[in-house]
């Protein structure tokens, strides 16, 4: 596995320790690597009104964007699951807002699934509003 993926997974594992998941008890951590080499993390933040739960991936991206980052090389997500988890549809759409980059999902046991944003959500921005890349 690429060194940057290992670094990102380690950062996601740290963020996972701070997950707020009192309802599902399913802690998730994420980390995103910007084009200029910075790492930003996020964890899931649940809510008593379940639908308001924020996923780790979106929180990591929001944290990066809040510092001015809009271009990314890779995003890692980790959970204590039998298989590497598959990001939800909402997170895929939010990931795709910022273009195509690598996605790596890992279990605590070290199983890894590598993909890309484009593979997970093809044609995410095609045709809509006829926008140019706004990043
Ligand atoms: N969750 C994430 O944070 N990321 C994913 O990719 C899958 C699901 C969270 C949402 C909720 O807090 C818990 O995991 C169970 O769905």
Image (spheres, rainbow, N blue to C red):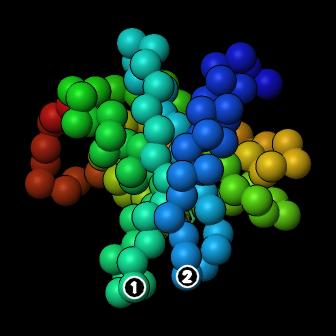
| Residue at x-position 55% and y-position 76% | 22
Cα distance in 3D space between marks 1 and 2: 8 Å
| Residue at x-position 31% and y-position 45% | 62
Q: Quickly name the residue at label 2.
A: 23
Task: Name which quarter of the figure residue 51 lies in.
Answer: bottom left
Circle 1 packing at 10 Å, graded few (<14), some (14-19), many (20+), is few
Q: Quadrant of ligand 1?
A: bottom right
| Residue at x-position 62% and y-position 62% | 27
Direction from residue 6 to residue 27 in the image, left or right? left
Instruction: Say if 85 sits above or below 102 in the image.
Output: below
Labels 1 & 2 near each other (Cβ < 8 A): yes
Q: Quickly name the residue at label 1.
A: 48
Q: Where is residue 133 in the image (x, y as percent from the top left)?
A: 20, 34
**Disc number at residue 77?**
none
Q: Nearer the viewer, residue 38 or 102?
A: 38
Tell me the SS state at disc 2: loop
User: Which quarter of the rendered picture does the C terminus lie within?
Assistant: top left
**Within 8 Å: ligand 1 and the Cβ of disc 2?**
yes
**Within 8 Å: ligand 1 and the Cβ of disc 1?**
no
Q: Which of marks 1 and 2 is nearer the N terminus?
A: 2
Instruction: Say if 89 sits above or below 104 in the image.
Output: below
User: Which quarter of the rendered picture does the N terminus lie within?
Assistant: top right
Tell me the SS state at disc 1: loop
């Amino acid at each position: 596995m690429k060194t940057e993926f290992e670094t990102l997974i380690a950062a996601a594992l740290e963020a996972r320790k701070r997950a707020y998941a009192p309802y599902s008890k399913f802690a998730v951590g994420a980390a995103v690597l910007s084009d200029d080499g910075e790492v930003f993390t996020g964890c899931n933040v649940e809510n008593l009104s379940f639908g308001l739960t924020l996923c780790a991936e979106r929180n990591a991206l929001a944290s990066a964007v809040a510092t001015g980052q809009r271009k990314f090389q890779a995003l890692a997500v980790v959970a204590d699951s039998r298989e590497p988890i598959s990001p939800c549809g909402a997170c895929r759409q939010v990931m795709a807002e910022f273009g195509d980059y690598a996605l790596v999902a890992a279990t605590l046991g070290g199983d890894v699934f590598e993909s890309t944003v484009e593979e997970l959500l093809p044609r995410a921005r095609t045709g809509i509003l006829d926008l140019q890349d706004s990043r």
